[in-house]
Image (cartoon, rainbow, N blue to C red):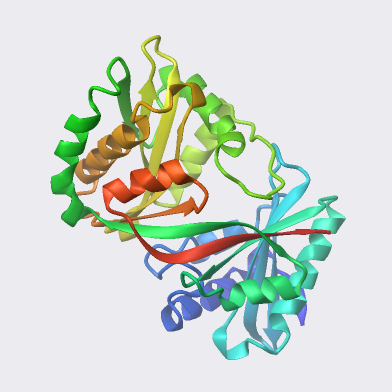
């Protein structure tokens, strides 16, 4: 049986995720320590976000065997939805995932959305079962990302030489860093850079529009992060006239602070070729280690076609560990 989950279903959703993460740690691309649903309260909050999202559960009697979540942007990209499907390994290949996908896509249609986007992970050069499953449902690969990790203990001794190397190229620019909350004086520049990401970063065939960012959106995200134990370490590049022309961000979960996630990095087109990307990333990694000295590993994802950013990450010592394909389906 497939049905939409309600806030009172928080316990069964939490138990499914916890069981899956313990028995199959890679199943949800997370661990029990840094799972976004780390408590019954967090599970309840996930189930109480209508109309932005909906979660469906598959049941075998009283036991939930799988779940599908559908998230829909409300400020921009009103034509699409993001879907994620998980079936416990013991119940895979029995039609549970397909039934969950059908329920999720029906909810997307009911809300007037016409495009669904999802992700599937696999080993480099070997498409994973998630991709095969998605393609059997009519999804097509829109872009492929390389998932990479860097050992901060091993690479920190190389940072000083890189800083000295790039300093002449970025002369005249200023780096500013902050923790968790964007300073008021940089809020306008931060919103402009954030809105440029979908236009400037490679997105392949994904039907993405520019996002809409303002103070309310920034402050709400910051509050949500803190409530969930997530922290942002950020560094921006300012042009000689004070305009923000570059940004890089790292996210860390305080429950698993031995590793972090290198989020987006962007330099405005008119200011590229000055090693600002590398400069910002090294500075931000220094700030990360000052805030979280026990953070030893960073993970990031880069589109294979993003030659410039892949070159920066190669310099920093990142190595490829898996691939993520972003798939899309028109309803």
Classify residue 295 as left or right of residue 322.
Answer: left
Classify residue 86 as left or right of residue 231.
Answer: right
Check the image and name the residue furthest to the top: 241
- Give residue 106's quadrant in the image: bottom right
Residue at screen point 40% across, 9% down: 241
Look at the image and tell me whether residue 231 can be seen: no
Rendered location of residue 4, percent (x, y): 74, 68
Q: Is residue 260 placed above or below 209 in the rendered structure?
A: below
- Give residue 93's quadrant in the image: bottom right
Look at the image and tell me whether residue 204 can be seen: yes
Closer to the camera in the image, 121 or 184: 121
Residue at screen point 25% across, 30% down: 166
Classify residue 161 as left or right of residue 168.
Answer: left
Residue at screen point 79% across, 71% down: 102
Classify residue 87 as left or right of residue 311.
Answer: right
Residue at screen point 43% across, 41% down: 308
Closer to the camera in the image, 88 or 51: 88
- Give residue 71's quadrant in the image: bottom right
Q: Is residue 91 placed above or below 204 in the rendered structure?
A: below
Quadrant including the C terminus: bottom right
Rendered location of residue 254, percent (x, y): 33, 54
Quadrant including the N terminus: bottom right
Rendered location of residue 11, percent (x, y): 56, 73
Rendered location of residue 300, percent (x, y): 41, 53
For the image shown, how many numbered marks are present on the structure?
A: 0
Q: Is residue 82 placed above or below 315 in the rendered structure?
A: below
């Amino acid at each position: 049986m497939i049905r939409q989950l309600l806030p009172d279903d928080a316990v069964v959703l939490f138990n499914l995720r916890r069981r899956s993460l313990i028995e199959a740690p890679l199943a949800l691309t997370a661990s029990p320590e840094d799972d976004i649903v780390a408590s019954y309260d967090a599970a309840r909050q996930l189930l109480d976000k209508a109309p932005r999202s909906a979660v469906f559960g598959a049941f075998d009697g009283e036991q939930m065997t799988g779940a599908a979540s559908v998230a829909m942007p409300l400020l921009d990209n009103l034509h699409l939805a993001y879907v994620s499907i998980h079936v416990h390994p013991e119940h895979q290949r029995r039609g549970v995932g397909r039934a969950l996908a059908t329920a999720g896509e029906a909810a997307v249609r009911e809300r007037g959305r016409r495009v669904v986007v999802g992700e599937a992970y696999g080993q480099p050069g070997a498409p994973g079962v998630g991709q095969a499953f998605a393609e059997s449902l009519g999804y097509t690969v829109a872009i492929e990302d390389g998932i990479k990790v860097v050992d901060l203990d091993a690479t920190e001794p190389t940072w000083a030489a890189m800083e000295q190397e790039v300093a002449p190229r970025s002369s005249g620019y200023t780096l500013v860093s902050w923790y968790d909350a964007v300073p008021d004086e940089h809020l306008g520049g931060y919103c402009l850079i954030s809105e440029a990401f979908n236009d400037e970063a490679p997105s392949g065939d994904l039907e993405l529009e520019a996002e809409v960012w303002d103070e309310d959106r920034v402050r709400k995200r910051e509050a949500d992060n803190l409530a969930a134990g997530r922290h942002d370490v950020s560094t921006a590049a300012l042009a000689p006239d004070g305009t923000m022309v570059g940004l890089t961000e790292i996210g860390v979960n305080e429950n698993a602070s031995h590793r972090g996630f290198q989020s987006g990095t962007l330099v405005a087109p008119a200011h590229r070729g000055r090693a600002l990307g590398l400069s910002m990333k090294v500075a931000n990694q220094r700030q990360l280690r000052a805030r979280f000295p026990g953070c030893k590993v960073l993970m990031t994802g880069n589109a294979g076609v993003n030659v410039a950013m892949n070159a920066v990450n190669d310099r920093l010592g990142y190595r490829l560990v898996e691939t993520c394909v972003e798939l899309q389906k028109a309803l």
